[in-house]
Amino acid sequence: MKKHNNSKVIAALVGVLMTCSGAQAQTVDERILTMDDVVRLAQEKSILGMSYRNQYLSSYWSFRTFKAENRPALMLSSNLLNFNRSVSEVTKFETGEKAYRTNYSMTNDVTLSISQNIGLTGGTLVFGTSLNRLDQYDPNRSTSYYAQPLFLSYSQSLWGFNRFKWNKKIEPLNYEYAKRLYIENMEQVAQTAVRYFWDYASAKASYERAITSFDESKRLYQTALTRFDMGTIDREKLLQLELSVLKDSLSLNTTQLQMRTALNQLCSFIGAPENATILLNINYTVPVVALNYEEVLTRALANSSFEMNQTIQELQADENVAQAKSNRGFSASVNARFGMSGTAATFDESFATLQDQEVVGISLTIPIVDWGLGKGHVKMAKAQSERTHSELEQKMVDFRQDLFTQVTEFNNQYSQCEISRRAAEIANESYNIALKNFGAGTISVTDMNQIRTERDNAVNTYISNIGNFWNSYFGIRKATLFDYLSGTDINIEFDKLQE
């Protein structure tokens, strides 16, 4: 009676598992993907990749704004229908007497101008033409025009802070930094996708081994039932085999859940449907790539965003010092305006009575007592600049050390993969021999389980080492923006991103 109940339990477990597997197979979307396919999909469709693209586009338009500031700007400005009917205080010119008078008028004006920022001096040059009309309604109805057919104006600070000069130094570097940072971010996306790829590969391999182990346990248990009826094995061994079947069924459920979780993470990251089944086309061959630290360092400094970011921060620190110095103490600015102007009661006459117009002035600001405020700002800026330079030197040391560690670890990964591959082969062969011996009754269930665990651990280590190899490889790619398998720099067609 006990034998029949045990058989029913095992059969029920098998039925449930097969039903779940069959139901899943009917609803999934199957895709065959290589590691390169996963990387490509992640870079094209992942939310993280889209976020990095928007970050780059923000920097691109910031650079376009900088370029626009250094080009001539054509501007049309006007004030229309400015109606004013109010009482205001006025002062008589002859006597200085004050009185209230009614203002009942309307003004309209329009100006067309071309302006150009001068990066060399920090000033702004404006060339334009303007027309004003004044309609007076009280006490007498009248109309007058004020025309400036041509005017030229220039304004700038003398010995002050020239932001155009500093922007010309920094903004092109900022844009180049944004491009390199975008490529690095895409390599980070690739590195994450590779990690998910091998996590799923490992989970799927564990699930497939769990299926095989479950089938083997069932077969051994069925054989043991027959041998128990014949009296060739005792009840203790039969119970141990039954326990192995139950444990393997639980392991099958656990590994299936782990595989599905890993699959969901992979699908979510690469933008695949939730019900997709990724059939991996796995290449376990690890390429032989030997890296030289000095060559890697040279490429990293030349290609990556790190050293460029260092340069930008140094320039920004120097810019802050220059700005603090220009705002300290004596300051002056010059404004000049030249042109022709005329006024008359009619539009045509306003152009017939043109007169020269010259307006030149210098504004001065001389602090007498500022209690060391300007000096303090300069000292603060210099201290911050020195701190920034010290921090950048330390970051360079850390960058070199981290890169040296990455190169050393990567160069060790190939041998790790080869050793773990051979260990997995030996463990798998030992397991097959043990399986035959277990069927012949020459080893115990405990020994069999231990050998199986060693086999599983060896295979897991092998797959994990392959994943670590590729993760390390893509880390080196990100640090150098260089593909060592193809021997080419990693570039992106930025023009397509800007469309």
Image (cartoon, grey):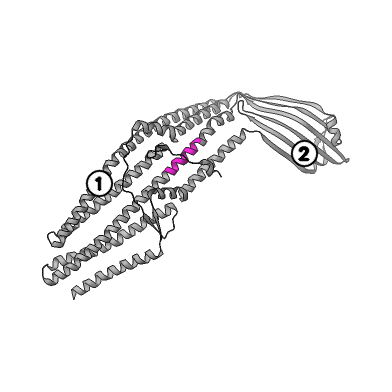
For the point 75% across and 41% down, the residue is 79
- The prevailing secondary structure element of the residues shown in magenta is helix
Q: Amino acid at mark 2?
A: Asp
* Image: 498 above or below 302: below
Q: Amino acid at mark 1?
A: Ser
Report the front residue among 165 and 404.
404
- Asked where in the image residue 123 lies, by quadrant, the reply is top right
- Asked where in the image residue 306 lies, by quadrant, the reply is top left
Mark closest to the chain's N terminus, 1 or 2: 2
Q: Label 1 belongs to which residue? A: 420
> Residue 109, which numbered label?
2
Say if the magenta span includes residue 179.
Answer: yes
For the point 46% across and 34% down, the residue is 309
Looking at the image, residue 153 sits to the left or right of residue 366; the answer is right
Circle 2 SS class? strand
For the point 35% across and 30% down, the residue is 294
Instruction: Give the spatial CA distance, label 1 vs label 2.
Output: 83 Å
The magenta span reads 176-187
Looking at the image, residue 57 sits to the left or right of residue 214; the answer is right
